[in-house]
Image (tube, rainbow, N blue to C red):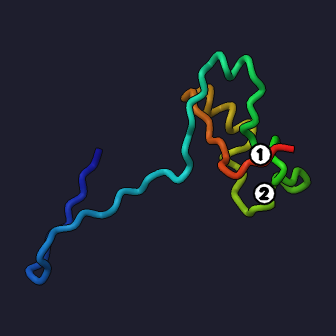
Amino acid sequence: MASYHVEASPMTKATKTPKRIRPSIKHDPIHPSDYLKYEIAMACEDCSHFKSDDATCSLGYHTIHHRRETQKQSYELTGKVAICRFMEID
């Protein structure tokens, strides 16, 4: 992990470090037996806000991180998926 340090000039009193950038998408763990046993609604394709004709979200969110293929790949690599907090299921 890289550490950043900004030199204080004679005019400033305190030394500040830049803010850390955190990922904006939270990935939730799903137990493997639950993943195999239940059909968990976790992809844009399962949501009422998803418009399949142009693959967009009616709320204006980017769909690439929550699409079914991306979710499947994420789960297979990490055991976690990015469940949209605004998902509405019919």
Classify residue 2 as left or right of residue 33.
left
Disc 2 is placed on an element classified as: strand
- Residue 86, given in percent of the width and then of the height, sits at 70, 52
Figure disc tally = 2
Q: Residue furthest right?
A: 53
Q: Residues within 10 Å of mark 1 (few under 14, many from 20)?
A: many
The reply, left or right, for residue 30 in relation to residue 48 is: left
Quarter the N terminus occupies: top left
- Who is closer to the viewer here, 38 or 10? 38
User: In the rendered image, which quarter contains the C terminus?
Assistant: top right
Q: Foreground residue, 37 or 72? A: 37
Dot 1 falls on a residue whose secondary structure is helix
Mark carried by residue 57: 2
Which residue corresponds to mark 1? 44
Q: CA distance from mark 2 to mark 1?
A: 8 Å
Residue at point 74%, 30% (across, down): 40
First along the sequence among labels 2 and 1: 1
Name the residue at 81% across, 41% down: 46
Residue density around tag 2, few if under 14, some if 14–19, many if 20 or more, within 10 Å = some
Residue 21: image location, x then y, percent: 41, 56
